[in-house]
Amino acid sequence: MGKITSIKKGKTPGRRVEVFLDGEPALGLLPETVRHQKLKVGQELGESMLENLAKADLRQRCYNTAARFLSYRPRSESEMRQRLARHGYDAETIEKTLGRYREMGLVDDAAFARFWVENRNIFSPRSKRLAKMELKKKGLQTGIIEEAVNEIDEKENAYRAALSRARRLEALDYKDFRLKLGQYLGRRGFSYGIIKEITDRVAQELRKK
């Protein structure tokens, strides 16, 4: 048992707060932990409370780490779980953190899959097959993947991808142009039938200019 005699905040935002018990430094906690646990000078802390504070601080640190990871772009649950594990958090803490983010709608595999497909469709069009492979690597379930990729129009994606690439290949002769463009679309996962149709279409459009 000890009494809080001082709570010293860090000099910069986000720095850990030092909690003194009976005049001696005893705990280093995140400001959020101190605030959420409503710690104050004069409060008595027993062993069980000290253990609870340590656990609460660990959960808050995990929550903050997840927030930073999510700030760049949406993530799948599997990505989140792997990243938090690499930071050294235990499985129980990770699952509780993910549960909080699921409740807020910030970790949602179905929404993530839709985001991923829409983003690819706009900035880097590709086939359903390649999109499925990418989403599988993100740890998504088959049903979620299938629903997301059903929105892909493969011919439209192949055409837009081909137009973007064709501008770099216009100086080539007809044979090499079709070969290089076909290889590019192949790397995007499109089938032979779609590749042939789209390369023919784009080649003809360019020859008409």
Image (spheres, helix red, strand yellow):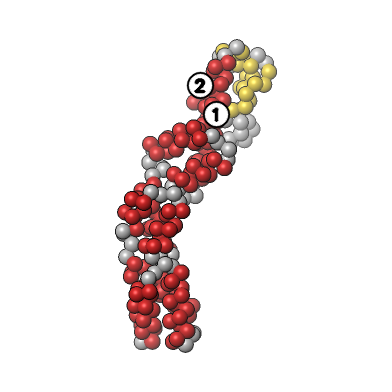
Residue denoted by label 1: 57
* Secondary element at tag 1: helix
Which is more toward the observer, 61 or 144? 144
| x 44%, y 57%: residue | 134
Count the numbered circles shown.
Answer: 2
Instruction: Report helix, strand or loop for mark 2.
Output: loop
Q: Position of residue 81 (x, y in %)?
A: 49, 42
The x and y percentages for residue 29 are: 59, 28
Residue 25 percent across, percent down from the top left: 67, 21
Which label's residue is closer to the chain start, 2 or 1?
Answer: 2
When the figure is inspected, residue 107 is found, relative to residue 169, above or below; the finding is above
Task: State the residue in front, 118 or 19.
Answer: 118
Q: Nearer the viewer, residue 167 or 151?
A: 151
Neighbor class of circle 1 (other Cα within 10 Å; few <14, some 14-19, many 20+) is many
Determine which residue is flagged by label 2.
38
Q: Which residue is depicted at the point 48% across and 44% down?
A: 80
Q: Is residue 180 above or below residue 108?
A: below
Tell me how far mark 2 sits from mark 1, CA to CA: 13 Å
Are the residues tagged 2 and 1 within 8 Å (C-beta)?
A: no
Report whether 193 appears left or right of 18: left
Q: Residue at x 32, y 65 (%)?
A: 153
Numbered badge on residue 81:
none
Q: Position of residue 72 (x, y in %)?
A: 49, 49
Is residue 60 visible to us here? Answer: no
Name, please, the residue furthest toward the right: 24
> Where does the C terminus fall, quadrant-wise?
bottom left
Task: From this view, report whether residue 90 is shown above or below residue 24.
Answer: below
Few, some or many C-alpha atoms within 10 Å of disc 2 (few <14, some 14-19, many ≥20)? Answer: few
Identify the amino acid type marked 1.
Answer: Asp
The label nearer to you, 2 versus 1, is 1
